[in-house]
Image (cartoon, rainbow, N blue to C red):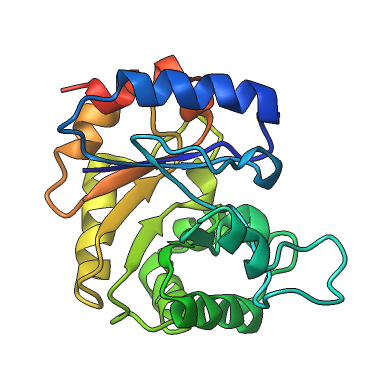
Amino acid sequence: MIYAANLKCNHTKKSYEIYANELSNALGSNIDSVIVFPPFTALTQNKFKFTQGAQNFYPAPNGSFTGEIGSDMLDELDITMVMIGHSERRALGEDEPFLRAKFDYAQSKGWDIIYCIGEDDITHMNGSTKEFLSDQLSNINLNYENLVIAYEPIWAIGTGKSAKAEFISEILDFISTKTTAPLLYGGSVNITNIDEIKAIKSCDGVLVGTASWDAKKFLDIINKG
């Protein structure tokens, strides 16, 4: 199982140091794949038992891109794992052409990519989820060997309302017909539903938001079951 934590805009450099050490020290030697995406300002060159990833980057080494994070900055920190396509980035204006540019750049660097897809509540209620996800998936190279796909229904992110296991299974089964990449589920994953989600045959892991911001709570999810 892959356990990925999206800390979003939480944790300072100081608090993340405490978080990272607590998490790393508690992970056993035979652990599953654990990934943490802290804010860029908290990323460190320190080595842990988990992999650090970047929540965001600009598809260039450097340049006149005010406020952006170039690959030179990630290279300096030995970061080779990135997240692309999260709904909160899409909501800020990252459209399909820009997401493709980010994907192609990350692929050219040989980085590991967690690529996020997901539909809003209206698309979900209209029964158009599969068509919507197909369009999102058509934007990237689904044969890239370092790709992981994270299905995150927007209507379940941060709402405390996770999708039903039957629906998650149906959607992940559908995605698996298009790619052999590992598949994650994200959307209000927590200690109460992790067992049910892990039991889904086509689910290779989870992308955890709010429930991962506290190291103890994230460890509870990792160690559950």
Residue 63, picture quadrant: bottom right
Q: Is residue 144 left or right of residue 19?
A: left
The front one of 175 and 75 is: 75
Q: Is residue 184 above or below residue 24?
A: below
List x then y, in percent, for residue 90: 65, 63
Q: Residue at x 51, y 77 (%)?
A: 103
Q: Is residue 112 left or right of residue 65?
A: left
Q: Residue at x 40, y 36 (%)?
A: 162
Q: Residue at x 36, y 70 (%)?
A: 130
Q: Is residue 174 left or right of residue 191?
A: left
Which residue lies most toward the top here?
A: 216
Can residue 191 be seen by looking at this rendering? Answer: no
Q: Is residue 187 above or below residue 68?
A: above
Residue 47, picture quadrant: top left
List x then y, in percent, for residue 163: 37, 42
Can residue 121 be seen by looking at this rendering? Answer: yes
The front one of 153 and 3 is: 3
Q: Is residue 78 left or right of residue 95?
A: left
List x then y, in percent, for residue 15: 64, 21
Q: Is residue 197 above or below residue 218?
A: below
Q: For the N terminus, give its image quadrant.
A: top left
